[in-house]
Amino acid sequence: MFRRIWAIAQNTLSQAIRMRVAVVVIVLLLILLPLMSMTATGDQTALGKVQTFVSYSMSLTSLLLCVLTIIVSVYTVTNDLRRKHIFLVVSKPIRRFEIVTGKLLGVVMLDVMLLTVFGVIIYGLALFMPRMSRAEGAELEKVNREFFTSRTRLETSLDPDEIEQQSRRRYEQLKEDNRLPEDMTREQVMEVLRNEALSAAKSIPLGYVRKWEFENVRVSDPNEMIFIRYKLRGLPSPSDDQVYGNWRIGDFRSVDASGRLQAKTRPYYVSRPDPVRTFVEFSIPADVVAEDGYVSVELQNNPAISLVTIVAEDVQLLYRSGTFTGNFIRAELLILSRLVFLAVIGVSASTWLSFPVAVLVCMAVFLTGTVNGFIIESIDFVSAAFAILYQFTIRPVLWFLPKFDEAYNPTRFILEGRTLGWLFLGKVYLLTVFIKGGLLLLLGVFIFQHRELAKTSV
Amino acid sequence: MVAEAQYAIETFSLTKVFRDLWGRAKVVAVDGLNLKVRHNEIYGFLGPNGSGKTTTLKMLLNLLHPSKGRALVLGGTTGDPLISRRIGYLPEESYLYPYLSARETLDFFGKLFGLPNHVRNNRIEALLEMVGLMGMANRPVGTFSKGMARRIGLAQALINDPELLILDEPTSGMDPIGTRQIKDLILNLARRGKTILLCSHLLADVEDVCDRIGILYGGRMQVEGSVRSLLQQSNRNQIVTGPLSDQALGRIRQIITEEKTDVEMSSPMDKLEEFFIRIVTKAQQEKLPTSGAVSTTKIGDFLAREQQEKTTALLDQLVSASMELVPQGDAMLEKVHTEEKSQAPREDRELLSRLAKQKMEPVVRLEETQATELTSVPTDKSMEQVGDETVRKSVLESLIGPDKGQSGDAGTEITRPDSSEEDEDVS
């Protein structure tokens, strides 16, 4: 069985390589990637340059390979049917699922090959870029610390869903009390409520303290550093565009009656002015983290200097948890997962659709995938009135569509030097490739198994 | 293993109705067909365009689903790999992957049959040699002419040493010499116990090779039977003689008139096929310059020789190259053998001219049946009349086969008086 699948796969591969679109994509990328590494500017810093390059080059590679995968996977099946090569293949002792699987395997092999080649090129160029732009000292260190690394990022739990629910609850309450403003639509009211809830949750008035607790901070080496990364805002906007905070980082869970700290780890105190509306980070030794991986971060709006309320837009804790190389490979694997999914849907769709129609369907799926989060969000609103209908019709379809954006965007992990965990990768593969892809493949095989391969001609 | 069925192919009121989008029956392509092809026979499946031949084949090969009825091939269905591994199929066009070379094509299909490497490689070499494409084995099939593509198509149909060979228009696009070779090959394969379903509307081809024919029209079998029983006009006689004087002719006419039956006298015509082969061979002997066609005739030349001396060995090798027992050295030996032969083109030419002349030799044979057939064709005086009985016999044998139950009257096939096959077709 595997020999036959392998034979089909090899044949598919040679078929794909001879396709003009494959050559175009390969040549295009071979020209564009080095060109982009030379022209990328970003914010003129070495970090900005390499971030821009990697971001654009990975997105471009991913996009082109996705399109290529769709075209090749659809072409390889429909062409065999249209040119009747399939007559010869089917009349041999081969099961039809072996043909479909072989076709899929061939396309995936092509993807793996191309992804490896272009991954190596991007990786090499990225490593080479800081040297080319003659970055030195602090700049180079910043690049190494924030880009050529792989850090786990722990986000604070101010997630939009909770805000959304909170504002919905408030909306319902207002509705019950008949206090809804009559000249506003539901959406407008919700928007106001949402903003209120958000800023309430983030605001730190003068002298007040806000605490973020992080758990599972698994620093491998206590001599390492952990990084506090945040974005602050002043309300009203401070004239010098600076806010002043006192940070206290440590394990403050056990404080005895006299107010003395009982923790084994030593807390750190940092007092610093920070520019507003931009991400800033500072590092402290990792020994601040308790043995059980707990650390708490507190920010006090310094009453001595500050004049405005601080709005903490985002506070994160980062720690190194891997190498850039490993992370890059996982990012490529994440790209591969979407390519495999597209190959499955391409092969599957073309078992019963003609070339143009199948390509159209795949493109639609792909584009939906790249904006999936946005679509689900917007439809969630619109369809609130048809909740049940929506729950059983559109929502499952949307669930079935792949998600390529937001949390599933590999470029963002690399861009931010954020660790893309094996666990996360495994989940994506399990859901997108094995469950969804497997179901689609089964559907394709079922159709291929039962359809008439010859056209009706008399 | 499936129990051996009585027929190699058997269909039970096989019906195919093509429907339109709304499920309304539009065309009945095949209508209650009961086709029965016995083991080890060459069955000619005839019919005009659109009579349902190809549709039937597609149903046999599981490419179309019957609307009604059932088709058994080797006692099972072709969807079953156990069955399809015993079948060779040459579709109406070759449908080969244009980017694969001849060798890669055979390798690909060999892999689909799960043939182990050494068996596959041996067979590929043997087949390439047999179809005369050794010289262009590494050229993409897409650059091949139709005839060459047919040869590769035929080779891929033989790679699994099939028990049942389904050939759809095997000679379309082939030059006459190639056609002759294919026909000889078919006969040879049948002698080796293969069953062949030959689908064609080149009636001359069918007539030359088939044991039984069936004529399909409008999806129904119009007539079916052995070629001989269908075509022989048992109430008519044909006498072919050497040069006769007018006097003699007059006397013969008188005798026949006394028998109170009509008579018609004329010089018999050569078959165009033989005429063509003779002309091409002559041109080759004289080494006339030609553009393009050279290679084709060369292949033909090569195959013609092979037909006589090589094919048997090659087929032996193919058959003996079963999965386990592979005479590793054999392929090499065969190869050396061939190369020696190709250095002696004279032999080939002799052979071709023998092929061309075989029917012109005076043959006098008595049939067990009532008719006496005297055959002697004096058309081409320039050609020497070689009376070498042994040579003639071997040629005839190779064409018809000594062991095909024709009981020694090998001449019958050739000199049989024909009723026009076209007439049958229309009726």
Image (cartoon, helix red, strand yellow):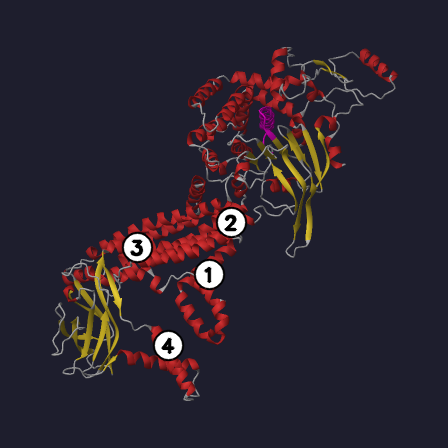
The residue tagged 2 is: A78
Snapshot quadrant of residue A295:
bottom left
The residue tagged 3 is: A330
Say above or below: A80 vs B396.
below
For residue B368, say whether it is visible.
Answer: yes
The alpha-carbon separation of the residues under discs 3 and 4 comes to 34 Å
- Circle 1 SS class: helix
Point out the stretch of residues depicted in magenta: B172-195
For residue B289, say whether it is visible.
Answer: no
**Spot occupied by residue A274 in the image (x, y as percentages of width and height):** 18, 74
The alpha-carbon separation of the residues under discs 2 and 3 comes to 33 Å
Callouts 3 and 1 in the same chain: yes
Chain containing mark 1: A
The dominant secondary structure in magenta is helix
- Residue B175 sits inside the magenta stretch: yes
| Mark before the other along the chain sequence, 3 or 1 | 3
Chain containing mark 2: A
| Mark before the other along the chain sequence, 4 or 1 | 4
